[in-house]
Amino acid sequence: MQKKPFIYIASLRRTGGTVLSEALTMLPYSFILREPNLGKNKFRIQENDYTLFLQFGIDLKAFKQKYLNEEDNSLINALKSQIIPNLTPHIHQLGVKEIHHRGWQNYYQVFEDIRFILTARDPRDIYVSIYYRKKQGKGSWKKELTPETLSTHLNNEFNRQLEMVEQANCIKVKYEELCTNTEIYQKIKTFLESEIPDTGAIGRFNAANVKRKDEYELHGNIITDKRVHRWQQEPDKRLVAEATKIIDLMPHYCDFWGYKK
């Protein structure tokens, strides 16, 4: 059985979840699976993770094939009973980072000790960030991007964050704090009972992903504040107006997280 708490990074898109998952990935101390979608009884396997786990004698693709269609929660139950015990000599603490949280309760029901890290960001910056990634043909946002479509999506996922706050052991982390407050990372590690002596493999995912090379060139292997309050430096007035509108469409989110016009 895993002695350390299971980690669930409950991110909204473009709120620093990837860099946080990297910061919390350092062998043998801990490892974060990025957006595996296990809560929905699916398993999205990153090729680098597959290769790494093979070194530990664990075939994630065979695991997925064996447990995928057995029953609801079968993958998470098998993760706990089959994979984690075999990982313990190699990885002391395991977790996931998700941006779609339907089914988060399935993790909560399986792991007796699970710690949730909720991430957020100024929604104006989220809007600007997604706008440019979509314009460049990058990222996973496939819908038309408007203040209405994005706010609907973010509000839905935020409501699931609120469910976590009501039911589970959570810590709140704003993107702006993560990028500017040097003490917040230590606070996160303490909350997780993490043994990581330093920050983990920051930049590893961006460096290996051709669609994120521009982000790696901007930030490198450290957490920076270069994209904090991005909307304030945006020269496109039309884009700023659209980004500003989203504040009015997310009043509960902004009140909860402390974002103001």
Image (spheres, grey):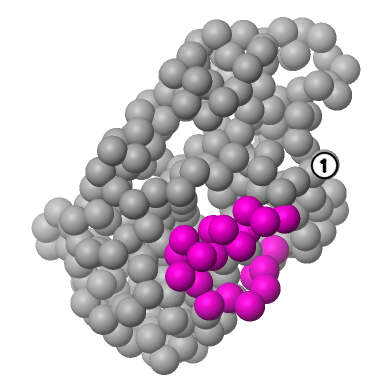
Q: Residue at x 45, y 64 (%)?
A: 192
Left or right of residue 89: residue 83 = left
The part of the image, by quadrant, that contains residue 63 is bottom left
Residue 40 visible (yes or no)? no
Quadrant for the N terminus in the image? bottom left
Q: Is residue 215 left or right of residue 156?
A: right
Q: Residue at x 35, y 29 (%)?
A: 159
Q: Residue 37 versus residue 163: which sits nearer the camera?
A: 163
Tell me the crowding category of disc 1: few under 14, some 14 to 19, or many 20 or more residues within 10 angstroms, Cα based. few
Q: Is residue 30 above or below residue 217?
A: below
- Picture residue at 72% right of the left edge, 61% below the top: 203
Q: Which quadrant holds residue 68?
A: bottom left
Residue ranking furthest to the left: 71
The three-letter amino acid code for the residue at tag 1 is Lys
Q: Secondary structure at mark 1?
A: loop
Task: Answer above or below: position of 167 versus 256.
Answer: below
Residue 185: where, in percent of width, then height? 62, 58
Magenta highlight range:
182-202
Q: Position of residue 161 (x, y in %)?
A: 38, 37
Residue 123: % across, % down? 60, 24
Determine whether 233 is above or below 184 in the image. Answer: above
Residue 144 picture quarter: top right
Going 71% across and 49% down the picture, which residue do you hit? 181
Q: Position of residue 17 (x, y in %)?
A: 56, 49
Quick one: 90 or 196, which is closer to the camera?
196
Quarter of the figure that contains the C terminus = top right
Quickly name the residue at label 1. Answer: 226
Q: Is residue 203 visible?
A: yes
Residue 213 in magenta?
Answer: no
Question: Does residue 256 appear to the left or right of 80 in the view shown?
Answer: right
